[in-house]
Amino acid sequence: MIVGIIADTHDRLPLLERAVKRLNEERVELVLHAGDYVSAFAVQRLKSLKAHLIGIFGNNDGDKELLKRRFAELDAEIRGKFAEVLIDGLKIAMLHGEEEELLRSLINTGSYDVVVHGHTHEVKTYRKGKTLVINPGEVCGYLTEKSTMATLNTETMKVQIIQLK
C-alpha cells in the first residue's frame, strides 16, 4: 500500500489543493495528516481526496470541535493528539511533535514500526533501531519556502519526499 503523509498545512489553500491533487495522482490509499490545519475551513479542501484520511491535532489548530465536525463530514477520522494506525502488519504512531520529550520517548521505545510527526516543518527521515521516523516537512512552505509531503510504500518501507513547489 502507498500511504500519503502530510503535515503543517497552515491554511495555505492553494498548496493544500496541490497536495491533494498529487496524493490522488500517486494513488495513495491512506493519507496521514500530522496536524496544524489551523482553521476548520481548510479541511474542506481535503474533500477531493480519493483515499481515506486520518489526522491528529497540532499545536496551532483552532476550534477542535469544528475540526472534528468537518472531518466527520468528509467521512474522515481525526483522533485527537495521537493516533495509532495498523496497516499491512505495520504499527504506525502519529503525533504532531511539539512535545519533544514525548516524541523522543515514543521513538526510543521501539514499539512502533513507523513514527510520523510534523511540527518542525523540516523534512526528516531516519531509522532509530527498527523504527522508521518520518517528518514530511510542511505543505504550507512558510518556514522553509519548500512545500513538501511524503509517501510510504508499506511493502518496501521506502519513503519518497515530494516537493510541491
Image (tube, grey):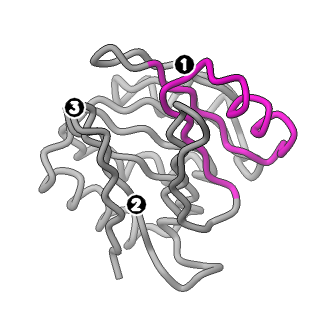
Measured as percent of width and height from the top left, residue 83 is found at 58, 23
Task: Return the mark for residue 1.
Answer: none
Task: Return the mark for residue 155.
Answer: 3
Measured as percent of width and height from the top left, residue 20 is found at 28, 55
Identify which amino acid the numbered label 3 is placed on.
Glu
Q: Secondary structure at mark 3?
A: loop
Residue under label 1, please give it: 84
Measured as percent of width and height from the top left, residue 165 is found at 35, 82
Q: Nearer the viewer, mark 2 or mark 3?
A: 3
Q: Residue at x 34, y 51 (%)?
A: 159
Sequence-earlier tag: 3 or 1: 1
Residue under label 2, please give it: 149
The quarter of the picture where residue 89 lies is top left
Q: Secondary structure at mark 2?
A: strand
Identify which amino acid the numbered label 1 is placed on.
Glu
Q: Secondary structure at mark 1?
A: strand
Measured as percent of width and height from the top left, residue 136 is found at 48, 57
Q: Residue at x 56, y 35 (%)?
A: 115
Q: Residues within 10 Å of mark 3 (few under 14, many from 20)?
A: few
Residue at mark 2 to residue at mark 3: CA–CA distance = 19 Å
Q: How many marks?
A: 3
Q: Are marks 2 and 3 in contact (CB under 8 Å)?
A: no
First to last magenta residue range: 91-119
The quarter of the picture where residue 94 lies is top right
Identify which amino acid the numbered label 2 is placed on.
Met
Q: Residue at x 61, y 18 (%)?
A: 111
Q: Nearer the viewer, residue 35 or 119?
A: 119
Residue at mark 3 to residue at mark 1: CA–CA distance = 19 Å
Q: Nearer the viewer, residue 123 or 7?
A: 123
